[in-house]
Each structure stands twice: as C-alpha cells, then as structure tokens.
Amino acid sequence: MENFIKKITKDVDLSFAILLSFCVYVFFAINIEVFFSHNISFAILERFAVLGLVGLALTICIIAGEIDLSIGSNAALCAVIVVKLTDPLGAPLAMLIGLSVSTLIGVTQGFVIAFIRIRAIVITVGTLMLLRGVALLIAEEKTVMLTDFRVPDFITTKVLMYFSPASLTVIFIFICVGIFMRYTKYGREIYAIGGARKEALTAGIPLRRPMIIAFALSGFCAGFAGTVIGLKSGTAQGLGLQYLLLAGTVAAFVGGVSILGGKGGVLGAAIGALTVNFLNTGLVFYALQVHFVQLFTSVLLVIVIVFQTMSRVFDSRQARKSLLATIDERKTSLLEKKRSAIGR
Amino acid sequence: MSAIIENNQLPFSAKFLQFYKDRTLLAILLSLFAVMFIYGIFFTENYLTITNFKAIIRDAALYGIMAIGLTFVTLSGNFFLLSLKETASICGVTFAMGMATGFGSPDLAGNFLVSLLAALAVGVVSGVIQGYFVGMGGNPIVVTLGGAGILYGIGAWWSDNLVINFTRPHDAEWLGTGSFLGLPSITWSFILIAIAAEIVLRHTNFGRKVYLVGANKAAGKATGHENFSMAIIVFTICSVCCAFVAVAFVAQMDSAQSNYFSAEFGSSGDMTILVIATVMVGGNSIMGGYGSTLRTSLGAIFIAMVDNMMVLQGFNSGPRIVGVGLMIVFSIIVFGLFAKGSRAQE
C-alpha cells in the first residue's frame, strides 16, 4: 500500500488525473442528489464498459508513440458485423467473427506501419474512411437492427449490484492488459518503442512485433466496444460511433499518457475513462443537448493538454536553470583559479 | 556534378523517364487520371460534356480551397487539423447570423461585407488560438481534436442547433450561385487561390520558410525560424480558407446550421477527412517539407473526378467512400514505399 501511494505521488500526471476525477465526481455528487447511489454507479460502470475500452485502445497506441484515428470506424464496422450476424448465427459466434475482424484490421495496420515505417496518423486517416465505407457497404447504407431484442439481454443483467457481464469482462480485460503491459517482455517492448524509438531499435528490439501487438490490442478493444454498443442498443450504423475518438482521446490524456509516447498505463486509462464517464453521466441530469457534452468533454481535454504542456515547459526550464547554475559554478571556480594564479 | 553531365547526355525518352522516376507519385496520379479519363469517355454516359466538367471542378473547388489551406499546415510539418469542418461550420453560422439578423443591430442585417469580415475574424481567432497551443508544443492532432469539440459546441450553442435562414435576394448571391464568364464564382476563387498559394509558396520568403520548418524543425530553429510563429500563421491561413469555403457554401444554400459540414455533407462522408484525403492523394508528404499546392489541387480534381464517375455509374455512398478510402491508403503506401530512405520519412 505504501509503495502504491509513493508511486502515485511520484507520478505528477497520475496524481493530477486522480485529483481531476475526484473533483468532477464531487462536483456532481454535491449538485445532484441521486448521483451518489447504487443505480448511478451501475450506470457509470455500464458506460465504462464502452469508453474505458476505447480509452485503453488509445492509451496502448499512444504509449507506443502512435495514435490510432480509426478506432471509431473500427468499432462501427464491428458493431455492424455483430448486429447483422446475430440473427443467422447467434450472438457468441457473431461476436467472435466481429472481434476477429477488428483484431485482424489492427494487425494489418500495425504491420503496414512497421513495414513502411510511416506515422500511424497518416495511415489511420486512410483506414478511418475506408473502414467507414466498408461498414456502410456491409450495412447496405441502412441502420442494421436485431429482429429479436431479447437476444443481447445476457450482457445487461445486473450482477453483484454494480456490475453487468459486459463491465465485468471489460474489467477483466483491463487487468489482463495491465499485467501484460507491465510484467511481460512484449508489453515492455511497447513502452520501449514509444519512449525512445531510436535507442530501442539500436538495442535490438524489433519494431514490427510490438507495433503489431499494440495495434492488435487497440483493434480488439475498439471492436469489443463496438460489439457492446451494437448489442446493447440492438442497432448499428455505418456512419455511427465517430464520437468515440474524442471521448477515448480525452480518457487517455486525462489518464496521463504523453503524446511523446512511453508514458502512462492501464490504471491511468481506467481513471481517465471514469472521469469522462462522471462528466457524461453528470451532464445527463442537466438535460443538455448533445453538443454541450461534446463542448465540456473538449474543455476537459484542453485543461489536461494545458497542464501537461505547462508541466513539460516547467520541467525543461527547471532543467535548463540547473544546467546554467552548474555552468556558472564551474565558471566562477575557474575564474577564481585564474585570479589566484595571476595574483601569485 | 557528373550526374548532371550524364543527365544532359541522356536521350529525351530516358530524361522523361528520369523526370517521372523522381516524381513517382505524380506519375502515378497522372496515369490514373488518364485511365479514369479514357474509361469515362468510353463507358460512362454524359461524361464528356462541358457541363459535367464544370460540375467536377465546382465540386473540387469546395474542398480544394480548404485543402490548399491545409497544405500550408502539412508542409510546415504540423500534420493536419481535425477541426476543419467545425471551423467551417462556426464561420458559416457567423456569416448566416450576420446576413439574417446583423448580430442584433437591424441596420447591419444583410450587410455582406460585415458578415464576411465577421466570419473571417472568427476563422482568424480559432486559427490563432489552435496555432498558439500547437506552437507551444502541443500535438496538432490532439489540440485540434479538442478544438473541434469546442468550436462545434460553441457554434451549436450560439445557433441553438437550428437552421438559420436568410431570404433572397441578398448581397452574397454573386458568391454563392453567381457565375463569371461561364464558370461559377467558387470555381474562380479556387483557381485564384490555387495560383496565389503556389506563388506564395514558391516565390516568397514566407513560402520558403514553410518548407524549411517542415523539412527540418531543428535547422529552422537554429536559423531563427521557430515553429511557434509558423504554427500560428499556417493555422490561421488554413482556418481562413475554411471560413471562405463556409461563406461561399452558406451563400449558396441561403442558410446555415452547425452540422452542415458533418457526415452527411457531400457524398464522401466527413468533410474533414475528405480534405485530408485530398492533401494526401495529391502526394504531399505528411511529415512536411515536401509537396505543393499544385499537387493538392490536382488531388482535389482527381477525387472529384472519381466521385463524379461513380455517381454517373449509379453507385451509392458506401462504395464511393470505399473508393476514396482506398485511394488514400494506396497513395500513402505507394508514397511510403517509394520515399523509403528519403527525408520524407521520420
């Protein structure tokens, strides 16, 4: 426990994330009476099942030093596939097919990025459009619907008061990915190519393996989010789910990843996603229109970016100051030596 | 030196090949142009008519102007803005507000100049603010993603998410639906802006600075051209281009709404992604320092041509989006493979 506290207080971004999420929660808990209740907690965890996964997907990509812009389209494609195939094949098989398609897309993206050595934002803008078109094609430009809306009931039943099978699975995925990122060689490789790519490559870490793993994980998470959304609402659209990119990015950045890569973690992603969930759930009570939710989410992102930039600028200034101080010391000592030599 | 002499002694055909080898993507683009064109002539009805070509260039003009603005950002190494359509929509809302209500004072209602200036001012302000954050060291993608949400939120809040109408006749008709010498005004503006941008980039100090900062940030910083001021300027240029497109579009529709440029716009989905696609399909290096607005203009016309042909062939929007997406991915992969080992890479 002491180690844990020490770790959190040492990490400025993580402690800022915890502070921010605490502030948001307390603000809504004070202003809205029912916010601190079992049902709202259940609702927040239900939203967490979707947003947390998207945040996790983006967190992994950003740790690897890249950003995946196509997760919205990937999720939409997976949702369309799952909803369309649930009727003929049954939910489990449809989920399996949708998730494997999403993961395969992630693998392909990672392979292309590592093979051609281009930045991920470049290729994922292309796949954003491509996957959206494919989703439209599969959905035949209509809204795909389940015929039997009772089929997906198994993911929304309440378990243990706060959880549903969906949110339990997502928490399980979080723990697995956390262990994978922290305690396995493959996970640490992702950190290495994100934090210092040139050094990592020189040290003999292959670029292809961690990149493919990172994007496969990201594709899987995006696909799972799409599956949960699609099955829960029973409908899916080719052009939908584009808001996931903004929400996921906010979650990842609130969670303390750095755009330079190699920083952040699964715990941060969870806290970031919870913060966004608190905000979104709280804003529901004010009966605001959709664009206000987008506005406040973006404001949250800007606050975090400003904080991160400020702390970076502050750090570099501090480093420069200490460097200048040491140089000054040496200069004065040299001068004194000279003076004493001349005086002699 | 020896390479130059050798090059001079080569026969013309070899020189021609050499020229194209240096410009692989341009060559591919031009040959694709030719293939599309020949296919269009033989297999598509009503393709080879002047009206159709006017329509192609008119389509290309709308996102071409925005793409020319974005080219400045891309060339200077700041990737791209994800807030293009939101900037355009808030500027469109501003313009329509001015035309409809005159921002609260009835004397100004319908005053074209005031509305135009207000819309451009909104564009300048949003560009400067986003450029400031990027120049301070923020990542352009993340900053403009946040900016997009804020701009959209403010635009929708201001207009109450309603459609703002203003009635004809109004002073902006010449820009929206008017034409000059047989071509629509928006096409003329596209041509003029493309020429102006090309001149600025090739023959002014500023243009060369854009290339310098994009090609090598460290060298730019060492020679006193920091990305801070550059980011502010290029983001402002891009936002003003968006504002101009928004004004022209709103003048044509006589109305504005905060999600006019969203997913349902045009035929190829999202306006922002379409504009970024235009820049990429033209073969500009997304890492900066390599490319030109001429390429972007060609890319815009190419995308419009493909889109137009698919419309004439009776495709729905799904295949069309797949087509544009394939074009982007294809051009990125080809560019990445051919530029391997060159400065276009990291």
Image: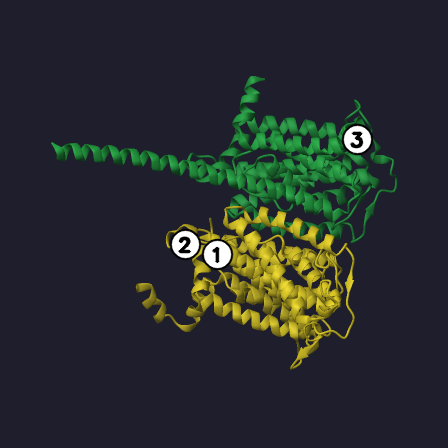
Residue at mark 1: B230
**Chain letter belonging to callout 2:** B
Cα–Cα span, label 1 and label 3: 50 Å
Q: How many marks?
A: 3
Tag 3 subunit = A
Asked whether the residues under marks 1 and 3 belong to the same chain, the reply is no
Mark 1 vs 2, N-terminal side: 2
Identity, as a three-letter code, of the amino acid under mark 1: Met
Q: Residue drawn 71% across and 74% down?
A: B171
Placement of A177 over or under A132, stated as above or below: above
Circles 1 and 2: CB atoms closer than 8 Å: yes
- The residue that mark 2 highlights is B220
Towards the viewer: A330 or B11? A330
Distance (Cα) linking label 2 and label 3? 56 Å
Q: Chain of mark 1?
A: B
Query: Which residue, given by chain and number where applicable, does mark 3 sit on?
Result: A33
Q: Quadrant of residue A39?
A: top right
**Which chain is painted in yellow?**
B
In the figure, the green chain has which letter?
Answer: A
Residue A9 spot, x, y in % from top left: 54, 26
